[in-house]
Amino acid sequence: MVPTKNKKSSGYLLKKGDKFLLLDCGDGIFRRLQDLRVDYFKINIILISHTHTDHIGDFMPLIHAQFVEGLYHPEKKRKQALNVIGPKGFKDAFNSLRKVMWPEPNEEMDIEIYEQPKILKAEGFTIKTISVEHVPWFNAIAAAVYEGKKKLVYSGDINKKVLLSGKFIDLARNADILLMDTGKPVGQVEGNHANPYEAGLFAQKHNIKHLILTHIKDGKDKIADIVKDCRKAYKGKLTIGKDLLRIKI
C-alpha cells in the first residue's frame, strides 16, 4: 500500500508467449518493468482494479512514456490499440487524468477502454471481471484470466464481505493461482481488506491450489506471523508476494 525502497505498489505481469497482460499499475511498477527488461510497448492489455494511487499511480506515466517515445522515435510508435480494462465509470476517470497529466493538443494514441467486461478476449488472453466492494464510495473489480484449463484469479482490493459473495466464490473456485489482497493485519477484523486468516479460510473452502498473499503493509506484521495466521486455515501451496517474484503457472 505504501511504497518503500525495496517494495513497490500493486502490479502483476502475466506473460503468454510474447504477449503481456498487466494487472494494475501502482507506484513504482514502471520501474519494475524496466528492472525486468520488459518492452512496455508489448503490453497491450492493462487491467485497473480500482483507482487508488497504489493501483494506478504509474498508469499515466506508462502511457505518456509510449506517447513521447513515439514522437521522438516514430519506429517505436504504438501500432495497435492499448486495451484498458477498468471498473464502471473508468472512462470518465481516465478522461479526467488525461486532462491533468497528458494535456497535449495532439494526443494520437489509440486507447480502448472496457468498463467491467463480463468476458474480454484480446491478445490471446481470456479475461472475466466482476464488480467487488473495496470501499463503498467508488467501483472496483476482480478478475479471472483463463488459459485452457488453467485459471489465475486476482482479487484486487476487497472488503472481507466479498469473501462471502457468490459471484466472487464462483470466480475464484478451483483457481490454480489466487492473488489475494491481504492488506489487513493479523487479528484485525474490521477494514476494507482481508487478513491472512480470512484469505486462508477462503482458499481452503474453495479449493485454491496456490494462494499468493499480496498487498501486505510493510513492517506491520512479521512474515512468519502472516504465514502462521494463514496456515490456521489453509493447507495448500502458499507464497508471500514480493517484488520481482516469478511463478510459472
Image (cartoon, rainbow, N blue to C red):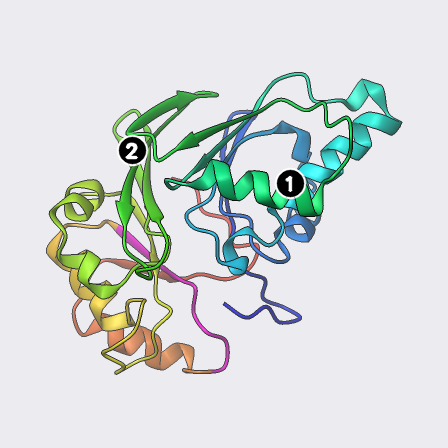
Instruction: Left or right? Give the position of 191 relative to 32.
Output: left
In the image, what residue type sits under mark 2?
Lys
Kindly indicate the quadrant of the structure image that contains residue 6: bottom right
Between 83 and 148, the residue placed more toward the observer is: 83
**Is 215 one of the magenta-colored residues?**
yes
Disc assigned to residue 150? 2
Q: What residue sits 58% from the left and 21% below the top?
A: 81
The secondary structure type at the circle numbered 1 is helix
- The x, y position of residue 91, in whole percent, is 48, 36
How many other residues sit within 10 Å of disc 1, few (<14), some (14-19) or many (≥20)? some
**Residues at marks 1 and 2 touching, judged by CB atoms closer than 8 Å:** no
For the residue pair 83 and 39, the one nearer the viewer reads as: 83
Q: Which residues are magenta?
A: 210-219
Q: Which residue is tagged 1?
A: 98
Identified by mark 1, the residue type is Arg
Question: Considering only vertical position in the picture, is 187 above or below 205?
Answer: below
Depth check: give the residue in front, 161 or 232. 161
The image quadrant that residue 201 belongs to is: bottom left
Separation (CA) of disc 1 from disc 2: 36 Å
Residue 47: give x, y in percent of width and height: 46, 39
Mark drawn on residue 148: none
Q: Residue at x 35, y 49 (%)?
A: 139
Name the residue rendered at 21%, 68% in the picture.
Answer: 198
Query: What kind of element bears circle 2?
Result: strand
